[in-house]
């Protein structure tokens, strides 16, 4: 089903929890008081997050087959079209945002730009929902995932993949600043340097 989440987070500080190797239960617990979007398997560290976001339709199929067990996750489940007007093959309970292109920022309600990865889309989603300040965790952009490799059919990022993601984030950063949205990267050792860095304790 297609969704337009609106702007429920107008002026709020929002946390986006990625899947990089720096992510942990301790990190996830440290922002339990904030609105949260979690990416892919990171939902296991924060099953009470507001949104679970995964760009890859195959992840949703795998999650449904392998992980849709205790229904402990209460938040909305979200993805987006891989191309315009092509609804992804995902379970019917997964909300779908419309594809607005690869690069940049789409101001139309219900649309995202893909950036080629879930983290870009989740950041875009938080901004579209009105967040004034977005904190990034687990956005290492190197070193794989905190949970190890995905199963073979899902694929895993390579060095060239990360390089492309970093370029896309770098082009997005000034567009968010123009809209008055502050993005803070709270990921230690991150190679994503286009956003203001900050230590978790701060």
Image (cartoon, rainbow, N blue to C red):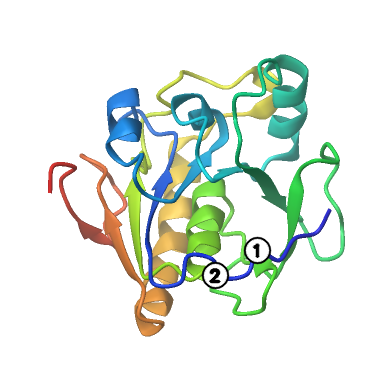
Q: Residues within 10 Å of mark 1 (few under 14, many from 20)?
A: some
179 with respect to 8 (left or right): left
Q: Residues within 10 Å of mark 2 (few under 14, many from 20)?
A: many
Q: Residue at x 17, y 52 (%)?
A: 198
Please, is residue 65 above or below residue 12 in the view? Answer: above
Task: Kindly report the distance in space between the C-alpha atoms of the residues bearing marks 2 and 1.
Answer: 9 Å
Q: Which numbered dot is residue 128? A: 2
Q: Residue at x 29, y 47 (%)?
A: 191
Please, is residue 146 above or below residue 11 in the view? Answer: above
Q: Which numbered dot is residue 164? A: none
Q: Residue at x 67, y 28 (%)?
A: 154
Q: Residue at x 48, y 67 (%)?
A: 127
Please, is residue 191 above or below residue 171 in the view? Answer: above
**Residue 114, horizontal then vertical, whole percent:** 62, 59
Specify the farthest residue to the bottom: 178
Label 2 SS: helix
Label 1 SS: loop
31 with respect to 124 (left or right): left
Find out whether the residues at labels 2 and 1 contact each other: C-beta distance under 8 Å. yes
Among the 4 quarters of the image, the one containing residue 188: top left
**How many numbered marks have been drawn onto this rendered protein structure?**
2
Residue 163 vs residue 82, the one in the foreground = 82
Q: N-terminal of the two: label 2 or label 1?
A: 1
Residue 31 vs residue 170, the one in the foreground = 31
**Residue 61, horizontal then vertical, whole percent:** 77, 29
Q: Select label 2 or label 1 by which is in front.
A: 1
Among the 4 quarters of the image, the one containing residue 8: bottom right
**Residue 170, horizontal then vertical, whole percent:** 38, 65
Q: Which numbered dot is residue 5? A: 1
**Residue 107, horizontal then vertical, whole percent:** 60, 79
């Amino acid at each position: 089903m297609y969704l337009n989440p609106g702007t429920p987070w107008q002026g709020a500080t929002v946390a986006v929890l990625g899947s990089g190797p720096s992510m942990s239960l301790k990190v996830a617990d440290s922002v339990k008081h904030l609105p949260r979007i979690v990416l892919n398997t990171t939902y296991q560290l924060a099953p009470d997050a507001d949104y679970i976001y995964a760009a890859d339709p195959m992840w949703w199929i795998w999650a449904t087959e392998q992980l849709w067990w205790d229904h402990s996750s209460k938040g909305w489940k979200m993805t987006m079209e891989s191309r315009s007007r092509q609804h992804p093959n995902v379970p019917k309970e997964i909300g779908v945002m419309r594809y607005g292109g690869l690069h940049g920022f789409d101001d139309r309600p219900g649309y995202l730009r893909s950036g080629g990865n879930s983290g870009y889309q989740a950041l875009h989603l938080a901004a579209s929902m009105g967040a004034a300040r977005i904190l990034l965790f687990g956005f290492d952009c190197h070193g794989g995932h905190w949970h190890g490799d995905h199963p073979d059919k899902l694929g895993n990022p390579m060095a060239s993949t990360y390089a492309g993601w970093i370029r896309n984030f770098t082009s997005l950063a000034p567009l968010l600043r123009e809209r008055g949205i502050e993005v803070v990267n709270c990921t230690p050792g991150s190679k994503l340097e286009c956003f203001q860095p900050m230590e978790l304790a701060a």
